[in-house]
Image: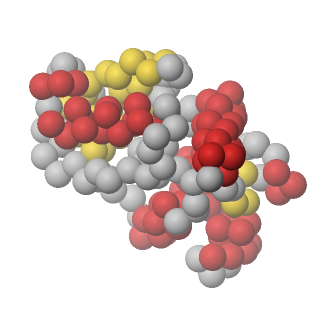
């Protein structure tokens, strides 16, 4: 049975949902939870939610680039393929919908890639914010464009800081 916990972050209150297999959902502030309603628990009371919260906070303070969490997400074969490709976009980098569609075999499926990215239940963990429109335009994002812009700016600053300290 899924359970929810909330996490206060510098970007607002996130809702994390887990079941017995892994993290099911990460809902952005101002976004209704994408998983079915579930009991709300204290984040520290559930090992997976506690770890997911720890990793999310580390990502948001620029000390973590990738997530290492068991996921319990479900989607079509195409969605799963897109989500896997999203995970391959390097931290601090972006890719257009068409480029990702080309990676999976058909550049004409850019809109379908956008639909699959929108269906991603664990944004940030699977970094759909790294997808951009043609010409570098910021386009749709479940957490809203200001959130997408903030996440991309965070990654750019972190990469720049690492370059300058090397």
Can I make out residue 139 in this image? Answer: yes
Q: How is the image coloured?
A: secondary structure
**Quadrant housing residue 75:** bottom left
| Left or right, 133 with reference to 93 | right
Locate residue 40, reporting x and y percent: 21, 20
| Residue 52, image x, y percentages | 30, 38
Residue at the extreme right: 135
Front position in the image: 91 or 25: 91
Residue 125: percent from left, percent from top: 43, 47
- Tell me the residue at 52%/38% (across/down): 62
Placement of 141 over or under 79, stated as above or below: above
Residue occupying the far bottom of the picture: 105
Q: Residue at x 13, y 46 (%)?
A: 20
What residue sits 66% from the left and 70% below the top?
101
Quarter-wise, where is residue 94 in the image? bottom right
Left or right of 142? Residue 63 is: left
Q: Answer above or below: position of 33 versus 99.
A: above
Quarter of the figure that contains the N terminus: top left
Can residue 35 be seen by looking at this rendering?
no
Instruction: Report the label total.
Output: 0
| Residue at (25% x, 28% y) in the render | 4
Placement of 157 over or under 85, stated as above or below: above
Residue 127 picture location, percent across and down: 53, 50
On the rendered structure, is 35 left or right of 96?
left
Check the image and report above or below for 101 versus 111. below
């Amino acid at each position: 049975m899924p359970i929810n916990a909330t996490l206060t972050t510098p970007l607002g209150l996130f809702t994390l949902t887990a079941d017995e297999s892994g993290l099911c959902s990460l809902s952005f502030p101002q976004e209704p939870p994408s998983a079915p309603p579930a009991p709300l628990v204290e984040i520290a009371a559930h090992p997976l939610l506690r770890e997911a919260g720890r990793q999310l906070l580390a990502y948001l303070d620029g000390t973590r680039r990738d997530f290492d969490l068991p996921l319990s997400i479900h989607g079509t074969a195409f969605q799963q393929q897109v989500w896997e490709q999203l995970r391959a976009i390097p931290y601090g980098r972006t890719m257009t919908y068409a480029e990702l569609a080309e990676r999976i075999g058909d550049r004409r499926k850019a809109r379908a890639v956008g639909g699959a990215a929108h269906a991603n239940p664990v944004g940030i963990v699977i970094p759909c914010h790294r997808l951009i429109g043609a010409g570098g335009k910021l386009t749709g994002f479940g957490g809203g464009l200001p959130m997408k812009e903030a996440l991309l700016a965070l990654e750019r600053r972190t990469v720049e800081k690492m370059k300058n300290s090397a």
